Image (cartoon, grey):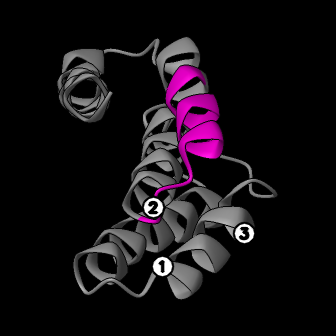
Amino acid sequence: LSDESIIAQISLYNSCTLIERKEYAEALELLDKIDSLSLGNAEWVEPYTYFNKALIYFSQRDTENSVEYLELAEDANEYQKKSMIQAKINGLSRKFKKIN
């Protein structure tokens, strides 16, 4: 793994903690920084980053951005452990159905 890949993974994990603490602005800052990093073999980081953004926007009741990032997460979710993120995507999609 490259240094940038490791930084991306750590940033992603840190964003999860910030989301749990409802510190959405800080989490988005970390997630936005991941976009400029080379992920190397850590293909799972990209869809998970999109998923976390979708979750933040969902929590903020920003349906348009949440749906956009949820779709990006699903499109980018092509890696060896994709079922983990797919389960998360499906769970958030079900929440949309409940509020509509």
x and y percentages locating residue 29 in the rendered image: 66, 78
Give amino acid for label 1: Tyr
**Would you say 83 lies left or right of 29 here?**
left
Left or right of 83 in this view: 100: right
User: What secondary structure prevails in the magenta region?
Assistant: helix
Q: Pointer 3: what residue?
A: 33
Q: Are marks 2 and 3 in contact (CB under 8 Å)?
A: no
Say which amino acid is labelled 3.
Lys
Q: How packed is label 1: few (under 14 Cα within 10 Å), some, or many (20 or more)?
A: many
Q: Are marks 1 and 2 in contact (CB under 8 Å)?
A: yes
Q: Nearer the viewer, residue 44 or 92?
A: 92
Q: Is residue 17 above or below residue 31?
A: below
Q: x and y percent of residue 93 in the render?
A: 30, 24
Residue at image coords 60%, 71%:
28
* Pointer 1 or 3: first along the chain: 1
On residue 24, the disc is 1
Q: CA distance from mark 2 to mark 3?
A: 16 Å
25 vs 64: above or below: below
Which residue ends up furthest to the right in the rendered image? 36
Taking the spot 33% from the left edge, 83% from the top edge, the residue there is 22
Residue 100 quadrant: top left
Give the magenta part as a residue range. 60-71
Callout 3: 10 Å neighbours few (<14), some, many (20+)? few
